[in-house]
Image (cartoon, rainbow, N blue to C red):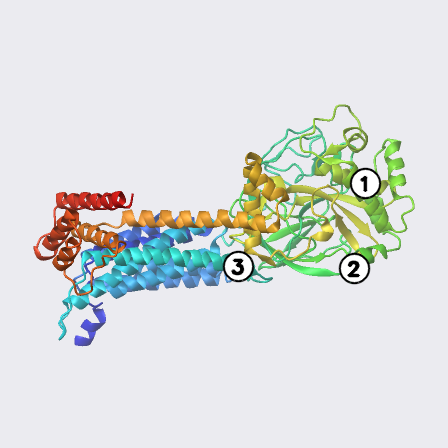
Amino acid sequence: MVGWRRLLSSGAPEHSVPLRVWTMMAVIVSVFAVASHDDFLEYRLMIPILVAAGFAFSYWRRGRRNWWVKVILAVLCFQVGWQFLRNVLGDPYHTSVPLTVLLLWLQTLHSFDVPARRDLLFSLLSSVILMAVAAAFALDASYLIYLAVYALAGVQALVHNAWQGMQDAASAPSRVAVSAPSAPIRRSMVLAANNLLVVVLLGAGAIFVLTPRFEGMRLTSLPFSPQMMLLDLFAGRIANPAYPEAGSDGQTLWNSSGYFGFSPTVDLRLRGRLDETVVMRVRATHEFNWRALIFDTYTGTGWRISDTRLTEFEGSAPPITLVHQDDEVVSYSVRSIRVIQSFYIESEQPNVVFAAPLAERLYLPAGRIYLDRLGAMRLPGTLKPGTVYSVVSNALIPDPERLRAATGQFPRFIQERYLTLPPLPGRIKILAEHLVAGQPTMYDRVMAINRHLWTAYTYDLSIPPQRRPGDAVDYFLFEERRGYCEQFASAMAVLLRSVGIPARLVTGYTPGTLNPVTGLLDVRNSDAHAWVEVFFPGIGWVGFEATPGFPDTADLGGSVVRRWVWQDLFEWLRARLGGLAARSPLVGRLLAGGSAAAKVGLWGVVVTAGMLAAAGTWRAVVHRAVPQTPRGALDDIYQQMCGVLARRGLRRGPSETVEEFSRRVESRGPLPEVRAISTFAEAAVYGGADPDPDTVRAAQQHLDALRARFRQRRG
C-alpha cells in the first residue's frame, strides 16, 4: 500500500503562482512556435487553451493525490500513442509530422498533472524540445520572435525556481539557522538573470554570424507535403492561376502578381513589372535557375509549345523516377553535379515542377507526373500555398573547352523543331551572320551573339507597348533596343536559329536571394525569368543568359552553402545604407570612395550601436517589468546613497551598521539627507513593518537633494 502511495505521489505541492505562470508561458510559446508551421495550424488555438486549462487544474488540485486523474491521463496517453503508430504506418515517409503531433499532445496531457516543482521543471524541459522542433520546421525569421519571448519566459521560470529553492532551504529544519532571502535579493536575482540572458543572446548571435555554412549543413532530408495530395484536375494541361485564359489567340492583360511565362504561350507584347511577393522558398545544395517550361516555336509575337504529347509517370511510393527521352539528350562525359532541392510554396503557382535540369527523382504530394516532349514537368494540380516537394537533379556544368570541342551533326528531330522560324525581316539574318563571321567554333558563335546583346542593348522594365505591328524580335533589335528578359532571350534564340544553331526559350525563376537567418533562398515574383538553351552535339542542352545584369549560367551551379553569415548580413546592411547614403553626403563618400577600413568601421559603428540600443532597451523593459515592494524600493534608494558617498571617498565598512556609518559621514560635515535616509532604512529593517509609499517618496527626494548638493560643490 505504501508503494502505491509513493508511486502516485508527485512530491511536495508547489504553491508558487509566479513559477507556474512563467512555466506555462514558456510551454505556450513553444506550442505557438511549432503551430506556426502549416502542418500544425489546426493545433494553434486548441493546444494552448488546453495547456492553460491544465496548469489551472493542476494548481487547483495540487495538494491532493488525484489517482483518478493519473488513470485518465494514462488512458489518453495510450490513445495518443496508438494514433501515432497508425499515422506512421499509414505514411512511413513523413514521421516528423506525427512525431511532432505526439509531442504536442503529451505536453498537453502532462499539463494536467504538474502539482510539484519537479513536474513543472519537466514541462519546461519538454518545451525546450518543442522549440528545437519548431526551429527544424522554421522557414523565415519569425522564429526569432518566438525564441526571444521563450527565452524571457524560461529565464523567469528558472529564477523563480531558484527563489523557491532558497525559500524552502530557509524554512526546512536544520542545525544551522538559515534566514529567508529578502525581496531585494529576489529582485537582484531577476535583474542578474535577465542581464545574463542579454549577454548569452548577444554571444549566441555573434557565434551565429561567425559560423561558416559548409555544403551539406542545410539539407539533411527530402521533405514533401504529407497531407496535400494533388488531385488530377488538368490531365497534363498547363494551368496558370495568374493567366487562366492564356493560350488564346487574343492578347491577354498584364497581371503583376503572376508571371505570364508559365503558360502554354509567351506573349512578347505584354508590358509591366512584377511585384515583390515571396512565392516560394528553396533549400538547395547548389544555386541554379529553377526551370519550369520550355518553348520551341517562335510565332513572331511570342512563343508556344508545339508538341502536346505527354509521358505519364506514376509512383505508389516516393520517389517518382523520370526517364528522359527525345530532346533531353545528355552526354554524361561532361561535368555534372548532383543537386538536391526542396521547394516550400508560399503563394499559388502553376501546375509545373520548378527544378534544376535534369530532374531525376521527384518527392511530390502527387501519385503521378507528366513529362512533355521538351523535358518540362507538369503536376496534376496547381501548387497551393503550403505545398512542399523535393527534387534530385543531375545538372550539367558548362565547360567552355568541351563546348568548343563539340562537333557533329544535329539529330533530325532537333533540326526540325529548333531551327524553324516564321518569315522574318531580312535584317535579322544579316545581323546574325555579321556577328558570327570569323568565329571558329559553334560555342564562339553563340558567345559572339550573346556578347552583342549584353553590350549593345539595355535591360529596362519600363518600355512602352510596341508602337507598330510586325515581328517582336525585329522591333526590339532595331527600334526599341531595350527591353526585359523575354525580349533578350527571344532575340538570342532567333539570331542563333538564323545561322543554323538550335536554340529554345526557357522560363522559370532565378535562384532567389539567400536569407542570412534561415539559410533558404527567398524567391519572389520579380525573380521570374527567361533565358536560352542551346543544343550542342554529343552534349545536349546548355543554358545561356541573354539578359545583361543577370548572372551568367556558367557562374551558376556553385554551392549556395559555402558562405559566412556575416557576408550576407553585410550585404543586407549595404543595401540599407544605400538609402542613407542618398541623404547623407558623408556616408555616401565613405561607401563609394572610402577605404576598406573606413567601410568596415562604419558598419561596425552601426552594428555596435544597434546592439547597445537593444541591450539598453531590454534592460529598461526588464527593470520596469520586475515588481518592487516598498521595502525593496527603500533598500535600493539606500544602496544608491551609499554609491554616491563611495564616489566621494566615504565607503561603508563590511561590519559597519547603518547608524555607525551615518555618524561617520556626518563627522565630515553636515549632511541631513544622509541622516534622513539612514533613519528610514533603520526603521524598515528593525521596525517590523513595511514602509509606506510616502516614506519611499520622501527618501527619493532626499537622495535627489544629496546628488544636487554634491553637484553644487563640484561646480
232 and 128: which one is in front? 128
Tell me residue 272's x, y (percent): 64, 31
> Who's the residue at 85% across and 32% down the image?
424
Residue labelled with disc 1: 452
Callout in the foreground (1, 2): 1
Q: Amino acid at mark 3?
A: Leu
Q: Is residue 589 left or right of residue 373?
A: left
Q: Is residue 428 left or right of residue 332?
A: right
Q: As displayed, is residue 566 above or below residue 531?
A: below
Callout in the foreground (2, 3): 3
235 and 397: which one is in front? 397
| C-alpha span from label 1 to label 3 | 42 Å
Q: Earlier in the sequence, mark 1 or mark 2?
A: 2
Indicate the quadrant containing the C terminus: top left, top right, bottom left or bottom right. top left
Mark 1 crowdedness (10 Å alpha carbons): few <14, some 14-19, many ≥20: few
Residue labelled with disc 3: 210
Q: Amino acid at mark 2?
A: Ser
Tell me residue 15's x, y (percent): 19, 59
Residue labelled with disc 2: 331
